[in-house]
Amino acid sequence: MNSIMVNFWEDFLDLLYPDGINCYFCGEKIAGADRFGVCSDCMGKIAFIGDKSCMRCGKLLETGELCSGCRSFPYSFDRAISLCLYDGKVKEWIYAFKYGNKPYMARPFARMMAARLKELEDHSTIRAVVPIPLHVKKQRQRGYNQAHLLGRILARELKIKQVDALVRKTNTPPLSGLTRLQRMECLEGAFEIKDANLIRGIKNVLLVDDIYTTGTTTNQCARVLKNAGCDKVYVLTLASGINL
Ligand SMILES: [Zn+2]
Ligand SMILES: [Zn+2]
């Protein structure tokens, strides 16, 4: 969908499902207006990361500015932030969003992500949202790319465009359980620029995905974007894994 169609569609959804009536997650009636369409009960189950995080990778950090990983391994992206921890109810909701055919759950998630991003000083320099792509086979199986769904709402909230600048060339097996080095080897050459014209002249971009684990995928994508001329690559993910 182009951006005009996306906005039209989102406006239409606003009419069909006015926010603040029923919670997107539990379906219960919401008392009073809520800008995300999430009831206070569900809101209380989200472990927001906020500022207690690594300045580079966005992982939860009790003290200091950089986590031990970022002190020893410089990522290609400039800064990553995650809205919340990948834990508890959030894990269930993300599972339902990805595999339960509930694409509408992108709306509350992406709106909360946008609100978090807007707290960062330099967010206004970002000119495009770039979703982490799925391999075409996986996307066909699932019916949609969850990162793309989050990205299009984020783009709308930030009043910038979403650009499908990247393509996933290899269908990598699940990376869980692999070390960082094994993940890097697995993903080497997995992503490419789809069409250089799509990001020509765009300096600062925002990579979007649902879950941040070791940062290997986002790092590969950031490197590809920088090689194609991007200046700064920010990363925004819905949830960040603990001890991954
Ligand atoms: Zn709820
Ligand atoms: Zn870090």
Image (cartoon, rainbow, N blue to C red):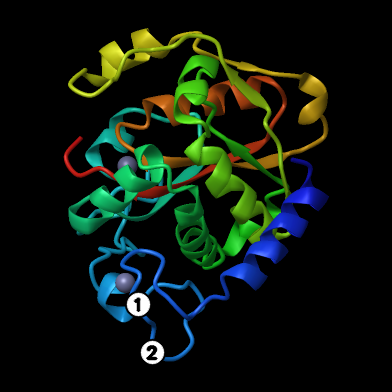
Residue 171 or 185: which is nearer the viewer?
171
Residue 222 or 144: which is nearer the viewer?
144
Ligand 1's image quarter is: bottom left
The amino acid pointed to by label 1 is Cys
The amino acid pointed to by label 2 is Ala
Residue 144 visible in this rendered orientation of the protein: yes
Residue at 70%, 53% in the rendered image: 125
Mark 2 to mark 1: distance in Å? 8 Å
- Residue 76 falls left or right of residue 167: left
Residue at 28%, 71% in the rendered image: 42
- Residue 147 falls left or right of residue 212: right
Residue at 67%, 59% in the rendered image: 10
Which residue is at the far front?
16
Which residue is at the far bottom?
32
Q: Which residue lies under the disc numbered 1?
A: 39
In terms of image quadrants, where is residue 222? top right
Q: Are marks 2 and 1 in contact (CB under 8 Å)?
A: yes
Mark 2 burial class by Cα count in 10 Å: few <14, some 14-19, many 20+: few
Mark 1 burial class by Cα count in 10 Å: few <14, some 14-19, many 20+: many
- Residue 163 falls left or right of residue 239: right
Say above or below: 174 vs 99: above
Is the C terminus in the top left, top right, bottom left or bottom right quadrant? top left
Quick one: label 2 or label 1, which is nearer the N terminus?
A: 2
Q: Which residue lies under the disc numbered 2?
A: 31
Residue 58 visible in this rendered orientation of the protein: no
Query: What x and y, as percent, mark residue 107?
Result: 52, 59
Residue 87 or 196: which is nearer the viewer?
87
Label 1 near ligand 1 (CB < 8 Å)? yes
Residue 235 marker? none
Residue at 79%, 42% in the rendered image: 2
